[in-house]
Amino acid sequence: MLPRECSYKLSNAESFSFKDPPPATFFTALDAGELNLCLDLLRRDDDPGADGAALNCRLAEILFHRGRRDEALECGRRALAFAAGDDADTAQFCAWLFSNCGCHDEAALVYECLLDRSPGWTEGHRHASGSLAASGALDRAIPHAMRASDLAPGRGEFALHAGCLLIDGGRLEEAVAYLRRALDAEPDDNPTLRALSAALLALGRQDEALSLARHAAALEPGDAAPAIHVCELLMRADRIDEAAAIIAPVARAGNATALRVLSGVEMARDRAAAALAVIDAAVTAAPLNAEYHLHRGHVLYRLGESEAAAGAFGHAAELDTDSREAKRGQFAAFLAGGRLSEATALGGRLLGQFPDDDEAATAVLDLLNRRLGTIDPEIFTHREGEVRAQRQAPRLIDALRCQCRVLHALIIRETRTRFGESRLGYGWAVIEPLLHISVLWVMFALLMHGRPPIGKSFFVFYFTGLFPYHLFIHTSGNMVHAIPNNGSLLQLPLVTKFDVVLARGIVEVVTDLVVALILLSGFCALGFAGAPDDVWNACLALLAIAALGWGAGFVNAVIAQRIRSWDKVWVQATRVLYFASGIFYAPGMMPDWVRQILVWNPVLQAIDWFRSACFAGYQPHWLDRTYLIAVAIAGLLAGFGLERVMRRRISEPL
Amino acid sequence: MITLDRVSKSYPTPAGRKIILDNTSVVFDSGHNFGILGINGAGKSTLIRLIAGTEPPDQGIVRRDGRVSFPLGYGGTFHGALSGRENVVFIARVYGASVRAMLRYVDEFAELGAYFDMPVNTYSAGMRARLAFAACLAVDFDVYLIDEVTETGDERFRRKCAAAFRERMARSDIILVTHNRQTIRQYCDRGAILADGALRLCDDMTSALDRYSRSLLAEPPPC
């Protein structure tokens, strides 16, 4: 802030007195207008004596008025160096010179030195305050300004200056006091009225501020500044129409700032088209104001003219390269106009310049995502709306056929992996029971003195016990593993857990039947006479035991889905059955009380049923076929039902 | 056409029940290809399995009009101990397709060479995906369900798949789950976003992708 008035006029320099006659050459050159020669002379003169300061001042003044400020400053500094400590005139002149050449801090220094010597110098305080404020030292400027006004309370300008500085320093209450003092001195001073209005506004006293501003505007109806101030106040109070009425006449007169403000008012009234016309006029009046272009861009963007908006934002960005708003505006305009390449490039620059701008980063990320989405894929499948043949609703027969296909496929698949990687593969199915029977034969042939409890051959006797037992054990035990073994196949929606368990059960039964036929054929070939006497009854007995095994297998499969180690529990439980089912003995060999317990074992019932069919002479009275069939059916129903009920739950991972 | 009628699905996790769908009704019209978007863990794969019928819904009904494929995904529908050939035969039998024609198609399409007769356990992930694609394409489905596998294999195989699907598109639809926007744009004309137990359909892919990217920005996926 420059001092508003300066006591130093050109004529003041005449008052410098020369103690000694000045060197003739200097004045000759000065009179001839040879300023460079004068400058040279003064530069060369190391010890100019008492007149050095005066001569430098004189030349500095002339140089300053010729516009040669740097050289004027040089002379001024030299004068200050040569001046005696009490040479107030020189110091004052230098301070004035520094202040007018823009060296406010140097000026402030000189003023403060002068004020140390004469603290009551009113103007000095005012000047020092002005220089300090201009050099940015607001804290030090304010006391001087206040002191100047206090020393001369009647001078409105001093009070105004102090008030303005106090506003800048945020000391609003004090500012109001000083501005009121200024107003007392000059009641109709427009800048004072506006400053006071601003201070009151900042204090939240809006009505007072507005009435002062209106007063100021009424005093100078043609002036833009008070009208703009009133307009801003009205805008803040949300009285937009009044604001427009105040600013419109001033704007029509062609004032660029007023036009800009009017455009803002029009935007606030939601009249973007009018706002555009006004800001266009403002831009014509002041084409180099970046903020006007920025505002114009926003107006155009609001109007949906993204192309023109991008241009306006671009102008603003060129005029003010540090403006983030302009770049963001242009980015948004590019996006809105679909100019994604430009937007991407600009987004990159925006983030490079303002890496902390999170909003911009989000916008750029969104843009990049959008671009990724719009890259034309190599193969784009575009389809005509085509009417397809209506499919017939699936019928029950189709469902059955599908079920059969699935079971068929699964059974074939099961046989492939039934014996895993073993090289003997299916051979094991035959060898295993054969070995089993042989061991039993060796043991019991010695114990029983060469005679089996029923029939003539140990081989056939053990076979009739072991075969139904295996049928039960294999089905009930191996169906548990069907679900884990076929995990990946269950990903096929047509293949259900029910299917795989059932297929496993069928494979087990068929396997055991094939093995039985092979063994029986072998016995016959060896002359053991193993063929059953009643084939029909034998088949029924096998069907019953198979049904029993399937029922247990389904129950086990469902339980194993919830209890992982259930299969091991089952294996242990069925070990007991090996001894409790009459495989290597006939129940008739047991004491009555033991037999009465054992007959509750359905496997024993099944084995005895099978034996009664094989050996016509063996018809035990404890055999109860109805009991066995009931248990088998109950088991099957339990297995199917459990699977049905638990279907949804057992599909959940544990 | 596939209809989800008031379907709910959730499954237990150590952190409580994870809700995939909550009483959601959606119709996947035939004649359109749908891309399903959703952040990791939203349950896209479960949804695909629900649509396929591999998994039953907790409540509600999934109606399928026409033949819906098995979910084509990384999970794999092959038995590891069986060879690729045996697996293909199995699928052919299950779907009632001609075994010989299917074997020829898969052998040619998947280009597994000698590996075709090796156990699937010995395959690389890419080979498995190739086998799965070939086996799925070999069956004449009305709707193909694809779960994130379009990015497997080399460029050449991807093109081959895309070409095969393009040819298939004249009579079949696709429901696709993927993170890759390009794939989605390549295959799909409609989108669906799976989030917060609801499946929202969008009539065009662009709005679906926009909405999806906004939801991504709003809440980053859990890492």
Image (tube, grey):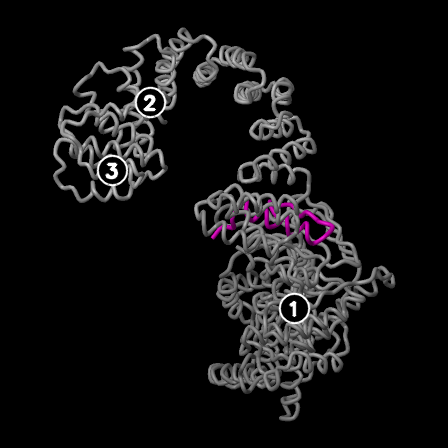
Q: Which of marks 1 and 3 is nearer the N terminus?
A: 3
Q: Do the residues under discs 2 and 1 have CB atoms within 8 angstroms?
A: no
Q: Which of marks 3 and 2 is nearer the N terminus?
A: 2
Q: Quadrant of residue A15?
A: top left
Q: Disc 2 designates what residue?
A: A6
- Give residue A545's mark: 1
Q: How far apart are marks 3 and 2 (CA)?
A: 30 Å
Q: Which residue is drawn at 25% across and 40% down?
A: A38
Q: Can residue A155 be seen in this view?
A: yes
Within the magenta stretch, is there residue A611?
no
Q: What residue type is labelled 1?
A: Ile
Label 3: which secondary element: helix
Task: Establish if A646 lies above or below A326.
Answer: below
Q: Nearer the viewer, mark 1 or mark 3?
A: 3
- Give residue A309's mark: none
Q: What residue type is labelled 3?
A: Thr
Residue A446 in the figure: left or right of residue A139? right
Label 2: which secondary element: loop
Q: Position of residue A373 (x, y in %)?
A: 63, 57
Q: Do labels 2 and 1 share a chain?
A: yes
Q: Earlier in the sequence, mark 2 or mark 1?
A: 2
Q: Disc 3 designates what residue?
A: A28
Q: Do labels 3 and 2 share a chain?
A: yes
Label 1: which secondary element: helix
Q: Is residue A623 visible?
A: no
Subunit under mark 2: A
Q: Which of marks 3 and 2 is in front?
A: 3
Residue A217 in the figure: left or right of residue B52? left
Along the line of sight, the residue nearer the viewer: A484 or A389: A389
Q: How crowded is mark 1: few (under 14 residues within 10 Å), some or many (20 or more)?
A: many
Residue A197 in the figure: left or right of residue B211? left
